[in-house]
Image: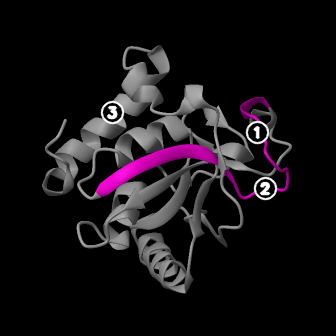
Amino acid sequence: MERATFGGGCFWCTEAAMKELEGVSSVTSGYAGGHVEEPSYREVCSGNTGHAEVVQVEYDPDAIGYDDLLEVFFATHDPTQLNRQGPDVGTQYRSIVLYHDDDQRNQAEAYIEALDEEYDDEVVTELEPLETFYRAEEKHQDYFEKHPNDAYCTMHAAPKVEKVRERFAEKVTTKQ
């Protein structure tokens, strides 16, 4: 198994989208990219920790590639929005790829460069090495799964899940 770490706005949405994929064994919501040790959700939401809301994806590289994860990640958020996604505003909602090794860095760098050609606006996704991943509080894990009728989930997470199911049907797990 390998790990990938992405931040594309609210972690509830990114987690829900990534959990749809065949070869993904787990997706954990958390915080990374900042300077505060063991931050809480409230601290991260303040925007003062430097952390982004991220997900850590554990996956089988024989079943799904890192390039596939990048494709889904970038298709489910707007990488041209600086420090925001939809209604969520602040550095904690920035677009960020936190790489685990040089191979991931090289793949993400090439993907972002190619993606920049597709958009009129500049792709502002940050690319940084993962230093420390802090698991979010339990109430944030599997949030969409536990609260599918939550207003935020129906407005923001559900459309991303549907997009993954439609656009990446061949990569979606059959155990839904």
* Circle 1 SS class: helix
**Residue 155 in view:** no
Asked where in the image residue 161 lies, by quadrant, the reply is: top left
Residue 126 at what x, y percent from top left? 63, 65
* Circle 2 SS class: loop
Using the image as rendered, state which of residue 82 and residue 156 is in the foreground. Answer: 156
Using the image as rendered, state which of residue 38 and residue 129 is in the foreground. Answer: 38
Q: Is residue 69 above or below residue 164?
A: below
Q: Identify the residue shown where x is 60% and y is 60%.
A: 96
Asked where in the image residue 71 lies, by quadrant, the reply is: bottom left
Q: Identify the residue shown where x is 45% and y is 15%.
A: 150
Amino acid at dot 2: Gly
Q: Which residue is mark 2?
A: 34
**Mark 3 Cα-neighbour bin, 10 Å: few <14, some 14–19, many ≥20:** some
Using the image as rendered, state which of residue 42 and residue 155 is in the foreground. Answer: 42
Magenta span contains residue 29: yes
* Circle 3 SS class: helix
On residue 44, the disc is 1
Lower sequence index among marks 3 and 2: 2
Could you tell me if the residues under marks 2 and 1 are in contact, i.e. CB atoms within 8 Å? Answer: yes
Residue 127 at what x, y percent from top left? 62, 70
- The boundaries of the magenta stretch are 24-42
Asked where in the image residue 137 lies, by quadrant, the reply is: top right
Q: Residue furthest front?
A: 1
Amino acid at dot 3: Pro
Q: Identify the residue shown where x is 83% and y is 50%.
A: 37
Q: Which residue is mark 3?
A: 159
Q: Identify the residue shown where x is 72% and y is 58%.
A: 33
**Mark 2 Cα-neighbour bin, 10 Å: few <14, some 14–19, many ≥20:** some
